[in-house]
Amino acid sequence: MSTPVVYQYQQALDAFRREGREGVLLKRMSELISLLDLTATLGSDLAGGEILEAALLIVLGELQVSKGVLYVRGADGVYLPRATRGLREPDPFPAKGPLPLGPVRQGESGFAGPPADLGFEVLVPVRRGAREVALIALGPRAGDRSYAEEEMAFLRSVAASAAVPIENGLVYAELRDVNTKLSRKVFELRNLFDLSRELTGSFDAPAIHSLFVGTVMGHLVVSRAALYLGAAARLELVLGRGARDDGGPFAEEDARTALAALTRALPVADLPPGPVRSRLQAARLAWVFPLSVGERLEGFLAVGERATRAPFADDDHDFVRTLGRQALAALENVALHLVAVEKERQDRELQIAREIQQSLFPRECPRVPGFDLAATSQACHQVGGDHYDFIPLADGRLAFAIADVSGKGTPASLLMASVHASLRALAGASSPAALVARLNQFLYESTQDNRFLTLFYGELDPAARRLRYVRGGHVPPYLLRKAGGIERLEEGGPAVGLLSAAEFEEGEAVFAPGDTLVLVTDGATEAMSPSDEELGDDGVCRALRSSVDGSAGGQLQALLREVSAWTGPAGCSDDLTALILKAEEA
């Protein structure tokens, strides 16, 4: 058992009185002063590293040793150098075997201490109870003097005096590190909160790109960065700062290969060989951080090396990942906002188109002596492409038309408005065939190739019960004879506006009392059943025969009921317009 320092001092004093040995007393007094100095140093308010350096210097100075290292035991059992004198900082070493109970010479115990090539002679374990705290490794003493029992006793006192302060200092340093990290986390969280509000409050994608990249560059302290987004289908540079890449989007296969490797942040050099890695290296980018929403990888942020060459820590990865998720969420909000704006624009367009379309339909059917008229147009969607019109002519005659425009929405409504105005301007000025020919040439020259319409135009002379007509690619009207049978009015030509200088033939029909002319668009003949069968001409004729003795309005309703029953719950697949003229019986 070692002798306490106070008793050693008392023994030295007794020896001095008996034998006059001043050297022994002075040595013990020097050791006591060193221990007091060591205790005061370890209990001072210096920084943790400075305390350990000062404590090591006190021990080396007292023993006249030129080199030494104070190791601190880590949580994983590895001894880490925390204070070094007389040599370059050595590497950490793992603990193998139990730490000696007291100072020992290198190699005298089963404990595997620092590497032998460092030249340490004595190892001084610092323990607090059964817990290992630190290890002091000392080199040879000056003048080739050995470590006598007095020096070993001094080192035992050093270990006993240093155990509690060192452990307390380590705990304090650990707490300080934890507080520092906690303060940093709080700072980061506040930044993330503030940035989140900025990101979610912006509907400008380039501004979000800039805010995200600029914030990450400031946090990581890097001078170059490049943001690539678009997933594998179209991975391309959306923003670069300090790094140029004019290569355009990556090929899908190259992007998919690179993104598959980005399960975590990694150096650019660890990406699979290929265009992605080559272009990032050419731009002097060193690290890649994946950016994802849930399990969906949307791209990555590549950054250059830090000016200090310090490595990126896990906290850096977490910060980029968290801010990246917020930025991607904000970009999704931008996309949804743009969709909403586009839908609002389309809704406005559809409303305008509907208003245009509704303004072109007659408010009511005209009264024509000797004839009963009925008409309707039902749009399958908000805006249809069908149209009908009645145009009064001189001498009591009546022009009428039914048409089906290619396309939907505002363009179709505008085209129909043009046709409506042209028919009203040309009606009665020339023959039906000449009128449709002029309209065809006008539309061919003034509209796109995919814009045309099918049209049936007729001029009725009520007094003579005679109809002159032209059919331009439209469904041939049905003429139901009172005497029985159904005729089709087919004279005419191709769809209007489809071919330049198309020729149209004029047809004529004469009504007998009780005859009915039925005009429909293909929304009737091509109405689909739930089993994908068309109603066809047979279905239309069936509905017309069932109501041949009724009024024009009754026949119209019978036709609409037949179409509705045929389509069933699925409803319409195209616009439906019908116009009926019935010659009254005397």
Image (cartoon, helix red, strand yellow):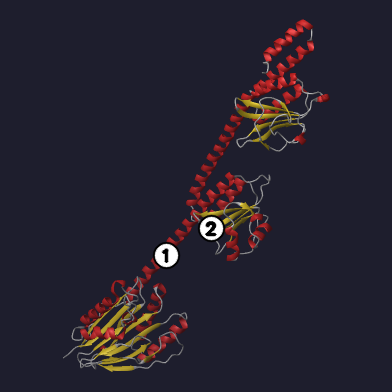
As rendered, which of 408 and 67 lies closer to the eye?
67
Residue 302: which quarter of the image? bottom right
- Crowd class of label 2 (few under 14; some 14 to 19; many from 20; radius 10 Å): many
The residues bearing labels 2 and 1 have C-alpha atoms spaced at a distance of 29 Å
Q: Which residue is mark 2?
A: 298
Q: Where, quadrant-wise, is the N terminus in this rendering?
A: top right
Q: Which residue is at 55% across, 50% downward?
A: 321
Which residue lies under the disc numbered 1?
345
Residue drawn at (56%, 64%) of the image: 234
**Quadrant of res 409:** bottom left
Q: Residues within 10 Å of mark 1 (few under 14, many from 20)?
A: few
Residue 227 vertical placement versus 81 (above, below): below
> Would residue 516 appear left or right of 242 to someone viewing this image?
left
- Chain-order first, disc 2 or disc 1: 2
User: For this rendering, which residue is in front, 60 or 94?
Assistant: 94
Q: What x and y, as percent, mark residue 379?
A: 33, 74
Q: Is residue 363 visible?
A: no
Q: Total number of numbered labels?
A: 2
295 shown above or below 448: above
Q: Quadrant of residue 425?
A: bottom left
Q: 272 and 235: which one is in front?
A: 272
Residue 449 image offset from top left, x and y in percent:
47, 81
Q: Position of residue 272 (x, y in %)?
A: 64, 59
Query: In which quadrant is the C terminus drawn?
Result: bottom left
Comparing marks 2 and 1, which lies closer to the viewer?
2
Helix, strand or loop under label 1: helix
Amino acid on which the number 1 mark rests in the picture: Arg
What percent of the width, then of the height, locates residue 218?
60, 46
Image height of 7 relative to 476, above or below? above
From the viewer's perspective, tell me whether residue 141 is left or right of residue 308. Answer: right
Check disc 2 and give the amino acid type.
Glu
